[in-house]
Amino acid sequence: MATAAIANLEDEFTPTDKPAGPCVMVVFGAAGDLTKRKLVPALFNLAKDKLLPANFAVVGVSVDDLGPDAFREHVTQFLDKEDHTSEAWSWFNERLYYERGDFANDDTYLCLARQLGEIDARCGTQGNYLFYLATAPKFFAEIVQRLGRHNLAQEENGSWRRVIIEKPFGHDLESAKTLNAQIQSVLAEDQIYRIDHYLGKETVQNLLVFRFSNSIFEPLWNGHYIDHVQITNAETVGVERRGGYFDNVGTMRDMVPNHIMQLISLTAMEPPASFKPEAVRDEQAKVLHAMKAFQPDDVIHDTVRGQYGEGRVGELIAPAYRNEPGVSPESRTETFVAMKLAIDNWRWAGIPFYVRTGKRLAARHTEITIQFKKTPLQIFQDTAGHKLRTNQLVIEIQPEEGMMLTFGAKIPGSTVRVGSVNMSCEYAKYFKTEPKTGYEVLLYDCMIGDPTLFQRADMVEAGWSVVDPVLDVWRAVSPRKFPNYAAGSWGPKESDDLLERDGRKWRKIS
């Protein structure tokens, strides 16, 4: 019986995905860190899993003076050396091409169109092009409009053309609306894939499966049983080499309208009518539109901003943010944000969503915590050593992916004592999976034309609608004391106060 069970389990976990159809992926900004650290490793993982089509190619576009050979060496440096002798490596390496050019020069697109035509003839890619904008945001509209001008965005004769756009999508609501309008003047909405790599994490996608395929949880997923929700996104790194860029952006713009809002919408959405892309995204959009707008007094009371000072992160003595290269010595830019959010709908009325995200924190960790309410009557409160405990579900997104459910159980012994028990599942151990970049699923979905995990225009604008009033107040009122938390800590004290005023506390992350 045990042997049969193992066999059935192996059958259940056997991949069933088919390779994507013929296409060329064009990466603008191909000499940058994103391409070599994330995109190329993700594509190579897809190649090893046989999910790329036989008729496939990658064209890198950058202003850097690289030939095809130098480009291949540049973007494959983060692949494991043992892979270099594999069949997948040979297959993948010979499909890498390069086009040098300025994004703002029409000649670049003329040369690109000529090369794509040659690749179609040589590789049988059938005129299907996926353009990835791994560039600075200032180039997004420029590139799309020039693609349109040179007939590279037009779908004809059965071919498809899609564009993936990295974050940040705008720097406020008005600029997001403008960017949407500029891009939609060239592309139809179903050609636009606004990417958020967090949505490529297995655990994030599993939120939908966990909620809507398990009858033991969905009936409890509402304000009758849930006390509050916490979302933590913590990074140990500082601004690294992006000080000049980050000092004009800050953590609020960098993380909240995209990553945080996507996690909230998946956690709080209503059951979709089906798993079709628009059905799922419709329900996500409803959550974002139902989020209560901040009034100026709410901003003062329900938001926290922080900036890190010098401190120890592991074995590293980290400098203060204001001492980072490219950062103003008097910078008012926040590197930490905590907020108390409310969703004004039937399911979540009165249930707070607490979020925190920041740099130079104590651990690299992202999780969603569902804190359930205590039972109506604490019948064990008079037992020896009793502590008030409630059920808790933790969905871990990084660095490990998994879930943990905490509940009460009797501690063995002659007296009745209640202790906490953890039931956990780590994806890597249970499903025997190799670590991924988070981009594999998203790139594959774009190749097959599935936009479920990508943001729609209205979702982007709804996220900015929540953030804009906060930024307005922060712009008008100087921070009281920056820096206000040490690198290597869990942020400013005001972040703890935000929950403690409501009789709650952040889940302790070890």
Image (tube, rainbow, N blue to C red):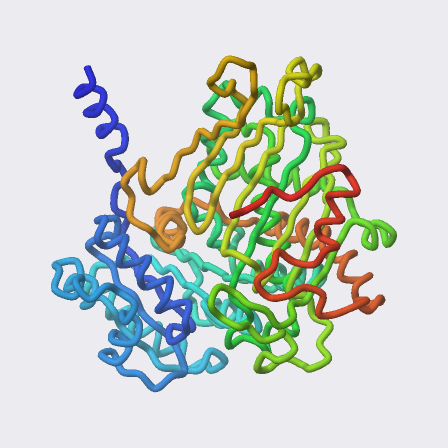
Across and down, in percent, residue 297 comes to 87, 52
User: What is the x, y in percent for residue 169?
Assistant: 59, 61
Identify which residue is drawn at 75% across, 37% down.
Answer: 503
| Residue 504, image quadrant | top right
Identified at 47% across, 82% down, the residue is: 105
Task: Choose between 116 and 83: the one closer to the eye.
Answer: 83
**In the displayed structure image, the side of residue 93 where residue 451 appears, left or right:** right
Question: Which quadrant is home to the N terminus?
Answer: top left
Q: Residue at x 22, y 30 (%)?
A: 10
In the displayed structure, would residue 206 be above or below residue 95? above
Direction from residue 225 to residue 35 in the image, left or right: left
Q: Residue furthest right?
A: 297
Q: Position of residue 250 (x, y in %)?
A: 65, 67
Note whether 352 is above or below 62 in the view shown: above
Residue lying furthest bottom? 65
Residue placed at 33% from the left, 57% from the top?
A: 42
Q: Is residue 105 above or below residue 360?
A: below
> How many discs appear?
0
Q: Which residue occupies the extreme front position in the image? A: 414
Query: x, y percentage for residue 266?
Result: 56, 39
